[in-house]
Image: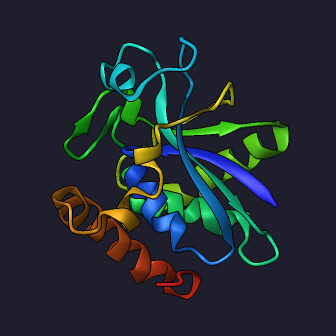
Amino acid sequence: MKTFVLGGGCFWCLDAVYQMTKGVKSVVSGYTGGAIPNPSYEQICSGMTGHAEVVSVTFDEDVIPGDTILDMFFTQHDPTTLNRQGYDTGTQYRSSMFYKNAEEEALFRAAIVRNQPNWRDPIVTEVSPLGHLYVAEHYHQDFYAQRPGVGYCQVIINPKIAKVRKHYAEWLTA
């Protein structure tokens, strides 16, 4: 099993796509990259902690390649907007990849280079060492699957799922 920690705006969006991806064994929403220990969602939303909303995606490389997980990441959010994803603004929504070792850092940087031709503007995704990963509150876990009818899911998440499905249908279970 391999685990990537990725931030692409609201973690509900990344969680929704990866929960329906073949070979993904778990997706945990959380916070990393900030200065205070054990931050709450309310503290994160202030934009003052330095943390990013992230998902920890654990997957089986015998089923889905790591490069595909990363390419899906660059498909489901806009990596060219600094500290913003649509209506969500603030450093907590930054496009980010947090590596555990030099091998992961190289994979992440290669994914940026590989995906840059898909975007007119430069990719601004932050690539940083992984610090402590704090698990988000329980109501953030598997948010989309539990509340697909909520307005945010209908208006923001569904189009992202559709975009990923257009390019990676063979990797999705639903």
The spot of residue 114 in percent (x, y) is 60, 59
- Tell me the quadrant of the picture where the N terminus can be found: bottom right
Instruction: Tell me the residue at 68%/49% (across/down).
Output: 4
Q: Residue 149 or 45: which is nearer the viewer? A: 149
| Image height of 19 relative to 34, above or below | below
Instruction: Tell me the residue at 64%/37% (across/down).
Output: 98
| Image height of 37 relative to 148, above or below | above
Can residue 19 be seen in the rendering of this structure? yes
Relative placement, left or right, of 17 versus 113 is: left
Q: Residue 109 or 101: which is nearer the viewer? A: 101
**Residue found at the very far bottom of the displayed protein:** 170
The spot of residue 99 in percent (x, y) is 71, 38
The spot of residue 75 in percent (x, y) is 44, 63
The spot of residue 45 in percent (x, y) is 32, 26
Question: How is the protein colored in the picture?
Answer: rainbow
**Residue found at the very far front of the displayed protein:** 138
| Image height of 153 relative to 50, above or below | below
Instruction: Tell me the residue at 55%/20% (across/down).
Output: 38
Can residue 79 be seen in the rendering of this structure? no
